[in-house]
């Protein structure tokens, strides 16, 4: 039996290393082929090197060559419906389309979003390609 994605995010947060915030987060990222990669937040004493659950899950997937995604579930220990932060939205957008379904755990239910709704404007490979073409045309 397949474990619901939100349950996999809840399980993933158990490995979080959060001595500073005491705010464990888990993420479960499902690929188009149905595989699931999980991540948790891993904090650092210098604070800025802290890794977010979503970026850890994404790295786990990409390192295996899987780069197309259908759904992401996110859960924090208080199950407060946390959504991916701005940085994680942009990190996800490098691979995922606007359609990526994002499920955020409120305990009793999940809040559902699409990546394009949480990050309506994104800098992408296309943005840079178009800027390069404009620069070439101006030469
Ligand atoms: N955190 C995540 O893991 N994902 C997010 O997108 C939101 C924030 C983590 C970072 C830090 O370890 C803790 O939650 C408090 O911000
Ligand atoms: Zn984040």
Image (tube, rainbow, N blue to C red):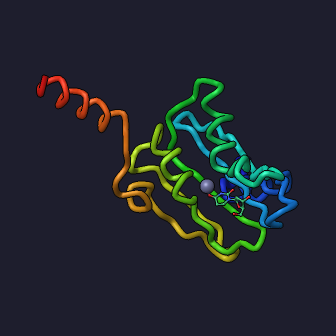
Task: Estimate the x, y position of residue 60 in percent, counting from the top left.
Answer: 68, 34
Residue 99 versus residue 51: which sits nearer the camera? 51
Rendered image quadrant of residue 131: top left
Task: Estimate the x, y position of residue 123 in percent, counting from the top left.
Answer: 37, 44
Q: Ligand 2 is in which quadrant of the figure? A: bottom right
Badge count? 0
Q: Quadrant of the C terminus?
A: top left
Identify the residue at image location x=45%, y=44%. Answer: 93
Identify the residue at image location x=76%, y=73%. Answer: 78
Classify 57 as above or below 101. above
Q: Residue furthest left?
A: 138
Identify the residue at image location x=78%, y=66%. Answer: 23
Give the side of residue 55 with respect to residue 131, left or right.
right
Give the side of residue 107 with respect to residue 24, left or right.
left
Classify 64 as above or below 82. above
Task: Estimate the x, y position of residue 79 in percent, counting from the top left.
Answer: 71, 72
Identify the residue at image location x=66%, y=41%. Answer: 36
Residue 94 versus residue 27: which sits nearer the camera? 94
Q: Residue furthest front?
A: 139
């Amino acid at each position: 039996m397949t474990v619901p994605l939100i349950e996999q995010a809840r399980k993933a947060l158990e490995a979080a290393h959060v001595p500073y915030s005491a705010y464990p987060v888990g993420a479960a990222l499902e690929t188009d082929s149905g595989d699931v990669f999980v991540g948790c937040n891993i904090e650092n004493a210098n604070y800025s090197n802290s890794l977010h659950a979503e970026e850890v899950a994404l790295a786990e997937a990409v390192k295996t060559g899987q780069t197309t995604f259908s759904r992401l579930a996110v859960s924090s220990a208080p199950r407060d419906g946390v959504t991916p932060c701005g940085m994680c939205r942009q990190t996800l957008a490098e691979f995922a389309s606007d359609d990526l379904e994002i499920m955020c755990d409120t305990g009793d239910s999940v809040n559902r979003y699409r990546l394009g709704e949480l990050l309506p404007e994104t800098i992408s490979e296309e943005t840079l390609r178009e800027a390069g073409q404009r620069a070439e045309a101006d030469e």
